[in-house]
Image: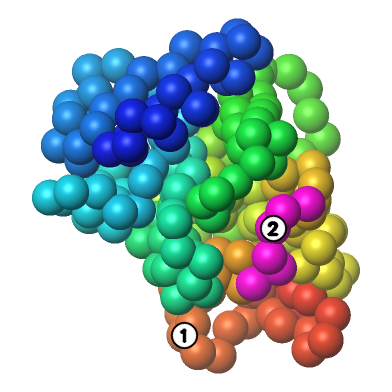
Amino acid sequence: MIDDEDAVQRLVRFPLEREGYRVLGATSGEDGLRAVEAERPDLVLLDLMLPGMDGIEVCRRLRVLSATLPIIMLTARDDEVDKVLGLEIGADDYVTKPFSLAELRSRVRAVLRRAQRPAGGAGVDDVLEAEGVRLDATRRTAERDGEPVQLTYVEFEILRSLMRSPGRVLSRRSLLESVWDSADYREQRTIDVHIRHLREKLESDPSAPELIRTVRGVGYRFGA
């Protein structure tokens, strides 16, 4: 957890440790980056408003270290611009201060449940291929026309959900539930931001998408 407020550190640490998590704290962006490199955590809780290097820059640098490390942004601003900005630069989710501990625990559990899903085992969708896109769930890799594509944890799961049912329209709510098992506490616009990132990485022309199409008033579908 990277947050300069000791009170918030204590507030978050106790309930998470009671559930069995090991919580490491850092009070600056620089210390947080060093801790991530040294400890390789399963999840980062990152405050937006940090002294010196702010949370936006920390998030950018974390994404250089790892494209798949789950990041939940903590922001004291109830501002849509800040929420979307966090998603734009690579955060997987966000929580607005003051937040309820129940909400935070829900998001942490959901993110870790997805990110730590065992890689082995036989699954009908371990490998999905369509329209020149290949997803390998066991290796957590993605390719477009044979070229590797770096996807964040959330981008991978959204694309996986769409590719499981090519041609079927999935609502924003159903996509939220497919990633986090619940749409509680989450705004549906979150999906729109991640879809735009996927298009930028996969589409020949993101402004005229052919792989991930919008069905107005309903949601998104993959392929024809």
Q: Earlier in the sequence, mark 1 or mark 2?
A: 2
Q: Which amino acid does label 2 sit on?
A: Arg
Q: Is residue 19 left or right of residue 81?
A: right
Q: Which amino acid does label 1 sit on?
A: Asp
How busy is the neighbourhood of tag 2: few (under 14 within 10 Å), some, or many (20 plus)?
Answer: some
Residue 188 shown in magenta: yes
Main SS category, magenta section? loop
Q: Residue 7, how many percent across, how many down?
A: 40, 31
Give 167 or 76, whichever is nearer the viewer. Answer: 76
Q: Between marks 1 and 2, how big is the CA–CA gap?
A: 29 Å
| Secondary element type, mark 2 | loop
Q: Residue 125, how many percent across, how many down?
A: 76, 39
Residue 212 appears anywhere in the view: yes
Bounds of the magenta span?
Answer: 184-189
Residue 212 shown in magenta: no
Q: Residue 18, how many percent across, how many down?
A: 62, 10
Task: Provide the residue designation for mark 2.
Answer: 186
Q: Which residue is drawn at 49% across and 72% down?
A: 79
**Residue located farthest toward the front when viewing the structure as drawn:** 7
